[in-house]
Image (tube, coloured by chain):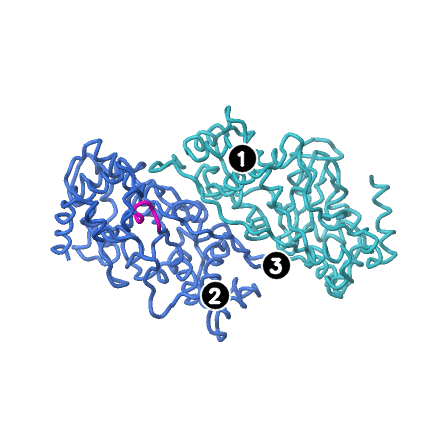
Chain colours: A blue, B cyan
């Protein structure tokens, strides 16, 4: 794979405008991939949206998926590290949910192969939503007549309210959370006017400098691999004592924490760059507060390059062209068990 | 006022169905009152909706007005006591924001005369959103170009981003948060089929027992008084040792905490009953978990009456007829300062 990818930047040297016309710059597909055992249906999306926003998935009743993956913002929580219930601080920065469906693995360390498996994690994580068990979540939902009806409509009427079905519905909704038609997408489809001059310069710089080696493909998160197969890179690749002192990137062992394999030390999934101007602060520990600094840091520790201020400005401009069109979402009415309350912590 | 009100239950004895036709049972008005210095405008409502959902009003960046006054649910947080940032526990249960515009004072103790003044409070309350000052909030909003544009559009272009304007916009949005056309409203406008038999029995019981003495008017929160003039009642009115041991209502001195006047001890604003089936748990301390128990408790400590199970069931049924139609709300896209982050705690 590395061999193949190393050809990409050379191709781009031929000139981005030409390549855009030739289809080398790929717009976001209209639909993300979905696992064969969970085809997206309208009934699942309706239910999944409700579950996504439902605070009854937290021990305290105070947060939902949307708390850390805010659909009103960049699909994250704009924090360095997320805050779970009871003020608990998480270990990593929340990745964006926008276009997460285009990732072939989930979490910074890729430990979940699908959005379904990702959704399972935070609910019972004591640093996040802190439910004692998924059974407790299901007991809450089962107490709400309207949810029983909606699960039956989305799944089999036999035993419909299960954790498996809940994460399937949430994942189905998340597969609708894509942001096409960014200025970049329009440009990639041949509209030369869709990006500004600085943005086009930035696209060329992005390619020439080598950012695109890893941030390739329509979601700028690497090649499109089968669901469950991750695209990981070592971060930082080049040691830099000054930046390490400042940002402490290496305190986190990355994928090694999951696999305990030596070769997985400091390996992280390559994240999408779509809407990246909306998702400050940056990196797995949220250590870098601004996008211009993130661009400088990446060039230094991943490519061993010092960018000029002009290059940084141009790449910044290009990255703002990756902000897409967000779907209109009506807030769900969450059903209740009339006149009853839950035992929230 | 007490004299006037005491006539009301006698009138109701004549029969609710007749009275509904005669207009004694009032449907929710189409528009709530608004203060003369803050007429509702579309530009304010657009901005106010964004501010209402904006987590940048909290020290940690993790909560918004909607966290404790959730528009996807009953306009509250479904908790006994609210949780602020850093896991801090509030002193009282969050009242619903739905139809709050029909309250002539805000908060359980009526310490704010308007929605504008209410909105000012939680932002800098260390147990709630915990901002150091409103200046800090304004500094954050000022860093976001799109907010500067929206404040200018809603207010004067000179010095538009102020705390005064922010709370005006939030209040203007909140005045759109009303839930008309409940089964009760349709019944009150003459549609005898709009409520079920138990609901109609419950309405009559509600009147005959005396609930309507205080829970009168279109919002079931007392007579419509000028903005700033509260309608307060002593809670509990009748001491009951058993219930007090169980629920501890009297630990909270109510309006006395604000005025330090002897006559304000245990005085609380009479809350609306609209959508009350969605706002468990109940009372200022959220001490009662279910609506049927809340009905029994109220009859005992406010009216010194023991209701039969049938009466409780009927009043419960009637109260579910106060669940109205909720406006469709599209989630706002919250603007950002591209590539920049805030110093969240």
Horizontally, is B132 left or right of B40 in the view? left
Magenta-colored stretch includes residue A184? yes
Q: Check disc 3: other Cα within 10 Å, few if <14, some if 14-19, many if 20+.
A: many
Tell me if I can see residue A203 in this picture.
Answer: yes
Circle 2 sits in a helix, a strand or a loop, which is it?
helix
- Marks 1 and 2 belong to one chain: no
Q: Check disc 1: other Cα within 10 Å, few if <14, some if 14-19, many if 20+.
A: some
Determine the CA span between mark 1 and mark 2.
41 Å
Residue on which the image places disc 2 = A43
Of badges 1 and 2, the one in the foreground is 2
Point out the stretch of residues depicted in magenta.
Answer: A181-186
Residue on which the image places disc 3 = A340
The secondary structure that dominates the magenta segment is: helix
Q: Check disc 2: other Cα within 10 Å, few if <14, some if 14-19, many if 20+.
A: some
- The answer to the question of whether label 3 and label 1 lie on touching residues, with beta carbons closer than 8 A, is no
Q: Chain of mark 3?
A: A
Q: Quadrant of residue B336?
A: top left
């Amino acid at each position: 794979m590395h061999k193949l990818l190393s050809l990409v930047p050379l191709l781009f040297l031929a000139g981005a405008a030409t390549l855009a016309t030739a289809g080398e710059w790929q717009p976001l597909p209209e639909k993300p991939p979905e696992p064969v055992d969970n085809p997206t249906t309208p009934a699942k999306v309706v239910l999944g949206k409700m579950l996504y926003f439902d605070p009854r998935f937290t021990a305290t009743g105070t947060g939902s998926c949307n708390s850390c993956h805010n659909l009103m913002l960049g699909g994250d929580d704009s924090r360095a590290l997320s805050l779970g219930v009871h003020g608990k601080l998480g270990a990593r920065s929340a990745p964006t949910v926008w276009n997460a469906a285009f990732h072939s693995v989930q979490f910074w360390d890729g430990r979940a192969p699908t959005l379904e498996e990702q959704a399972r994690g935070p609910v019972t994580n004591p640093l996040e939503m802190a439910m004692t068990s998924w059974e407790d979540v299901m007991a809450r939902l089962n107490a709400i007549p309207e949810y029983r009806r909606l699960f039956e409509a989305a799944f089999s009427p036999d035993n419909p309210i299960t954790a498996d079905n809940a994460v399937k519905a949430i994942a189905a909704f998340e597969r609708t959370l894509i942001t096409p038609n960014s200025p970049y997408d329009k440009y990639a489809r041949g509209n030369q006017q869709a990006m500004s001059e600085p943005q086009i310069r930035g696209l060329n710089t992005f390619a020439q400098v080598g950012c695109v080696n890893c941030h390739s493909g329509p979601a700028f998160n690497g090649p499109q691999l089968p669901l469950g197969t991750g695209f990981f890179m070592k971060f930082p690749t080049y040691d830099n004592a000054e930046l390490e002192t400042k940002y402490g990137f290496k305190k986190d062992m990355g994928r090694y924490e999951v696999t305990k394999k030596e070769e997985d030390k400091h390996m992280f999934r390559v994240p999408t760059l779509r809407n990246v101007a909306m998702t400050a602060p940056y990196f797995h520990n949220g250590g870098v507060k601004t996008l211009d600094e993130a661009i400088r840091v990446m060039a230094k520790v991943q490519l061993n390059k010092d960018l000029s201020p002009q290059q940084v400005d141009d790449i910044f401009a290009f990255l703002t062209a990756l902000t897409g069109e967000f779907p209109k979402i009506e807030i769900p009415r969450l059903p209740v068990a009339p006149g009853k309350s839950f035992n929230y912590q």
